[in-house]
Amino acid sequence: MNSLAERLELSIARNSPVGDDGDPELFVTALVLEFPLSGGEVRIVDRGHPAPIVVGPEGARRLVTAPALPLGLAALSPGGRAEATVHPLGPGEVLVVHTDGVSEARDTHGVF
């Protein structure tokens, strides 16, 4: 999973404009999720994204992840590597992953 996140980081760096006319906010938050074939858990690498929520018979809970810098910002933390977290999933539980694009959207004037 970390390997996939690192490859995404390299792809962004390789395909992003550089220089003074480049976008100063060229980064992306991401969750890399892995569901083992054996079931019963989810493994998460969090690159600055809002944590997922588990909803089930016992109610809802936000999963505690170990957020690292968003993809595209690795140069700010050389050698830093995102930590994967493992979370059990019980019978009848559903994982809800949502975009941060809604809460961080800007209008036509660039205002949040």
Image: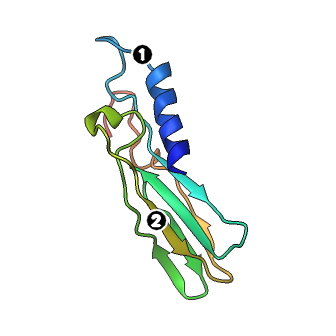
- Dot 2 falls on a residue whose secondary structure is strand
CA distance separating discs 2 and 1: 32 Å
Q: Which percent across, then down, holds residue 65? A: 41, 64
Q: Where is residue 63 in the image (x, y as percent from the top left)?
A: 45, 70
Q: Is residue 1 above or below residue 38?
A: above
Left or right: 13 in relation to 56: left
Q: Which mark is residue 85?
A: 2
Camera-nearest residue between 89 and 99: 89
Residue 105 placement: quadrant: top left
In terms of depth relative to the viewer, which is nearer, 87 or 81?
81
Which residue is tagged 1?
A: 17
Q: How is the image coloured?
A: rainbow
Q: Which residue is drawn at 60% across and 77% down?
A: 89
Classify the position of the C terminus by image quarter.
top left
On the rendered structure, is 88 left or right of 25?
right
How packed is label 1: few (under 14 Cα within 10 Å), some, or many (20 or more)? few
Residue at position x 46%, y 35% in the image: 9
| Residue 13 as seen in the image, left or right of residue 11 | left
Callout 1: SS:
loop
Residue under the point 53% across and 44% down: 3
Q: Position of residue 107 (x, y in %)?
A: 39, 34
Residue at the front extreme, as displayed? 79
Q: Foreground residue, 111 or 10?
A: 10
Q: Above or below — where is 55 with respect to 112?
A: below
Q: Where is residue 35 in the image (x, y as percent from the top left)?
A: 65, 63
Amino acid identity at mark 2: Thr
- Residue at 42%, 15% (x, y): give it: 17
Disc on res. 31: none
Q: Which residue lies furthest to the bottom in this view?
A: 58
**Is 105 placed left or right of 4 in the picture?**
left
Q: In which quarter of the image is residue 91?
A: bottom right
